[in-house]
Amino acid sequence: MRMRAVVQSFAFLSALAASTAVLAADKVTIMVGGYEKQIYLPAKLAESLGYFKDEGLEVELLNEAAGVDAENEMLAGAVQGVVGFYDHCIDLQAKGKFVESVVQFSQAPGEVELVSSKYPDVKSMADFKGKNLGVTGLGSSTNFLTQYLMMKSGVQLSDFTSVPVGAGATFIAAMQQDKIQGGMTTEPTISRLLSTGEARILVDMRTIEKTKAALGGTYPAASLYMQTAWVEKNKPVVQKLANAFVKTLKYINTHSAAEISDKMPKDYYVGNKDAYVKALADGKEMFTVDGVMPQGGPETVLAVLSGFSKNIKGKQIDLSKTYTSEFVKNAK
């Protein structure tokens, strides 16, 4: 009887310890601006590889089609972080809100400006004057880049219409129905439209070199950004997130596109795994190897935003407060 009591007592203590361990896990909610997009692949990949759990984190990934909506969720306190474009950190500082990239995923947007095959006469961005252009959402990074490319081509913002159509099926439907004549999107949406011949590429920003040609320099894009005040109060948690994501970026840079794709949910392939793998192989160089902000990148982003945004023009932006490399440099 005494032995049974000891065993039962040990079982109870083990269960209590396990329960305490679960309670001890740091819970973080991150909103992703479309986690099926390849540009945001590190978020789902880190989860799939178990890197969050390895750090003692309980991370909930929520999906939001447009980065601007994800940003608003964070500002409202509904989520602690956003996987979205770094440019929001600059845009928000101009509005008096301090947000910083704590892990820089990419050094190129991974975006493409597509033109509907119904419009063979469109040869440049200037030819989109008077037309409707698809973006994920108004105030989104695709909207920012579209406005910049149009202004750079000599077209005023009032001479075309940005239409929020999301990505994936909604973007494709908008183009098929001629609601948009062109638009900016990412993989795997790009490959789906190219494979059917319904669209062609006008401006390609999937590699570093092509991005430099289009935007004038390295353009840090996908990142994990958080409110600066939250980062300061929760440094141990942010460090764990940085540890997990730096490991993920190293995995991306040391494994083939096929190996990485095998770790992703099958519905991300949208019925064509070969096309998904090829698109990832072609665009994998956009990802940083260590999560560090690329040198000169913030200056390029500021120059792009200043090229069209009344919100940015004339404002003093302290770029050093829009990102930090402290956590990625201390990553295990």
Image: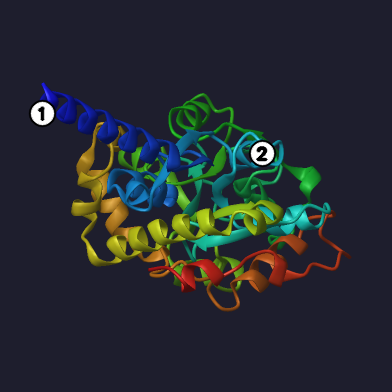
- Amino acid type assigned to the residue bearing label 1 in the image: Met
**Residue at coordinates 57% horizontally, 59% vertically from top-left?**
235
Secondary structure, mark 2, is loop
**315 left or right, relative to 290:** right
Find residue 230 and report its horizontal and vertical position in percent: 66, 51
What crowding class fits label 1: few (fewer than 14 Cα within 10 Å), some (14-19), or many (20 or more)? few
In the displayed structure, would residue 186 be above or below residue 208?
A: above
Instruction: Farthest residue to the right: give it.
Output: 314
Q: Judge depth for marks 1 and 2 and give the one in front.
A: 1
Spot occupied by residue 329 in the image (x, y as percentages of width and height):
48, 73
Can residue 300 be seen here? The reply is yes
Residue drawn at 35 percent across, 33 percent down: 19
Residue receiving disc 1:
3
Residue that appears at 49% across and 27% down: 170
Count of numbered tags: 2
- Quick check: 93 left or right of 48? right
Q: Nearer the viewer, residue 61 or 258?
A: 61
Residue type for callout 2: Lys
- The percent coordinates of residue 276 (x first, y second) are 28, 45
Q: Nearer the viewer, residue 249 or 237?
A: 237
- Which image quarter is the N terminus in? top left
Q: Is residue 18 above or below residue 306?
A: above
Residue denoted by label 2: 131
**Of the residues under marks 1 and 2, which one precedes in the sequence?**
1
For the C terminus, the quadrant is bottom left
- Color encoding of the figure: rainbow
Residue 284 lies in quadrant: bottom left
